[in-house]
């Protein structure tokens, strides 16, 4: 139902969150145009059960409020994101909380939300608690077809030797916004694979944040964001090592067309206690238009002296020699470009959990029958 009068629509999100909207004078938000949020209709949208009435898979059970209340915010605090503005907005919107415990080798889990064409704000919150030695493949699918905003907070607690393969497939609308936080706290021996793919949103702000509490864990991050028209996709990732012998393998990819804009800021912190850390971060951006823009900023903050850490960033167009090779084999110019684009995207999309294939992510992200 409407929250505020028409006269006070402009600042309603700030009023709801109890803090002004971030502005471009703040370093973390200086490339992020929040105009779609300022025009958002002041309505809280009902949230449909992401399980769709389907029973939980083997190895996955619901936590009751008495169990999940003490655990909520733990991963946000560990990753330093409990005070972030999108997190405050999500809390203030009184989100539906889906809290799940994972034991043993669980069957795959799919969670799907669709804001549809309704106007307003939909707030969602997911807590995943993986017990020692457990494993889970989970796919989150977020869709929108109208002028709305989806606020999604995913909190994960990975116990010792637990394994999580988390995929996020988000397909939006040119007037829709997505604010998504993924906060993960890893214990020693745990393994995280997190793959995100977004396209179509007028505004995406995605913040994957991971803390290895005592090191000796494995983290694999993959991202693909596609922008076209006037769209903006903004990813700010954060990785911190709390102990020795941790591993990070991160690749972030961008396809920018039209007048779309992509932003990537990837921060990796390796303190003195994190000796023998092995961390790699790569940002790769593909420009398909001379009007598109990419701002990329991989960061390493290293205090430990016995580490292997590397980062890099590339911004390029489709390679002329690769296009020529395909055309010399009788493939038309447009089809050759399309094949190269498919290969570029599929390197990330194939790492989504297996059940993502039912959503045909490559075809949907490319907007055709690829």
Image (cartoon, rainbow, N blue to C red):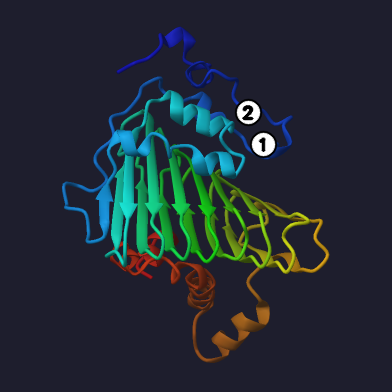
Image quadrant where one finds the C terminus = bottom left
355 and 114: which is toward the camera: 355
Q: Quadrant of residue 340 in the image? A: bottom right
- For residue 329, say whether it is visible: yes
Residue sitting nearer the eye, 11 or 230: 11
Label 1: which secondary element: helix
Q: Which of the two residues, 33 or 155, is positioned nearer the viewer here?
A: 155
- Residue 70 placement: quadrant: top left
Mark drawn on residue 304 = none
Tell me the distance, in whole angstroms, between the alpha carbons under discs 2 and 1.
7 Å
Q: Residue at x 31, y 34 (%)?
A: 65
Q: Residue at the spot x=48%, y=10% of the render? A: 8
Q: Is residue 82 left or right of residue 298?
A: left
CB contact under 8 Å: marks 2 and 1: yes
* Picture coordinates of residue 298, whole percent (x, y): 72, 56
Give the labeled residue for mark 2: 22
Q: SS for tag 2? A: loop
Estimate the x, y position of residue 11 in percent, counting from the top left.
53, 16
Q: Which residue is mark 1?
A: 29
On the image, the x and y values in percent for residue 325 come to: 60, 88
Q: Residues within 10 Å of mark 1 (few under 14, many from 20)?
A: some
Picture layout, residue 87 above or below residue 145: above
Residue appearing at x 40%, y 33% in the figure? 148
79 sits left or right of 53 in the view: right
Name the residue: 57% across, 65% down: 217
Residue 202 in view of the camera:
no
Quadrant in which the N terminus is drawn: top left
């Amino acid at each position: 139902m409407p929250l505020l009068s028409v006269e006070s629509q402009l600042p309603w999100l700030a009023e709801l969150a109890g803090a002004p909207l971030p502005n471009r004078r703040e370093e973390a938000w200086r490339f992020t145009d929040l105009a779609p949020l300022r025009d958002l209709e002041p309505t809280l949208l009902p949230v449909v059960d992401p399980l769709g009435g389907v029973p939980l898979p083997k190895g996955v059970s619901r936590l009751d409020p008495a169990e999940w209340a003490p655990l909520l915010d733990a991963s946000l605090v560990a990753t330093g994101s409990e005070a972030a503005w999108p997190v405050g907005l999500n809390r203030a919107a009184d989100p539906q909380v889906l809290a799940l415990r994972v034991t043993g080798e669980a069957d795959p889990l799919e969670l799907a939300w669709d804001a549809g064409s309704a106007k307003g704000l939909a707030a969602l919150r997911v807590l995943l608690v993986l017990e020692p030695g457990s494993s889970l493949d989970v796919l989150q699918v977020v869709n929108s077809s109208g002028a709305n905003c989806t606020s999604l907070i995913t909190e994960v607690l990975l116990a010792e030797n637990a394994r999580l393969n988390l995929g996020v497939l988000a397909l939006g609308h040119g007037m829709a916004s997505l604010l998504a936080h993924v906060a993960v706290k890893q214990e020693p021996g745990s393994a995280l694979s997190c793959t995100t793919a977004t396209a179509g949103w007028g505004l995406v702000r995605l913040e994957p944040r991971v803390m290895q509490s005592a090191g000796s864990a494995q983290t694999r991050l993959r991202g693909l964001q596609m922008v076209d028209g006037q769209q903006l996709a903004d990813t700010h990732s954060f990785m911190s090592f709390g102990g020795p012998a941790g591993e990070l393998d991160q690749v972030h990819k961008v396809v920018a067309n039209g007048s779309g804009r992509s932003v990537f800021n990837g921060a990796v912190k390796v303190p003195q206690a994190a000796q023998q850390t092995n961390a790699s971060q790569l940002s790769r951006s593909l420009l398909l238009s001379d009007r598109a823009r990419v701002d990329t900023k991989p960061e390493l903050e290293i205090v430990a002296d016995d580490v292997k850490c590397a980062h890099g960033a590339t911004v390029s167009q489709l390679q002329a020699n690769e296009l020529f090779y395909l055309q010399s084999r009788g493939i038309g110019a447009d089809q050759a470009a399309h094949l190269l684009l498919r290969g570029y995207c599929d390197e990330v999309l194939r790492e989504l959990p297996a059940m993502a294939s039912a959503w045909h992510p490559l075809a949907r992200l490319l907007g055709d029958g690829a």
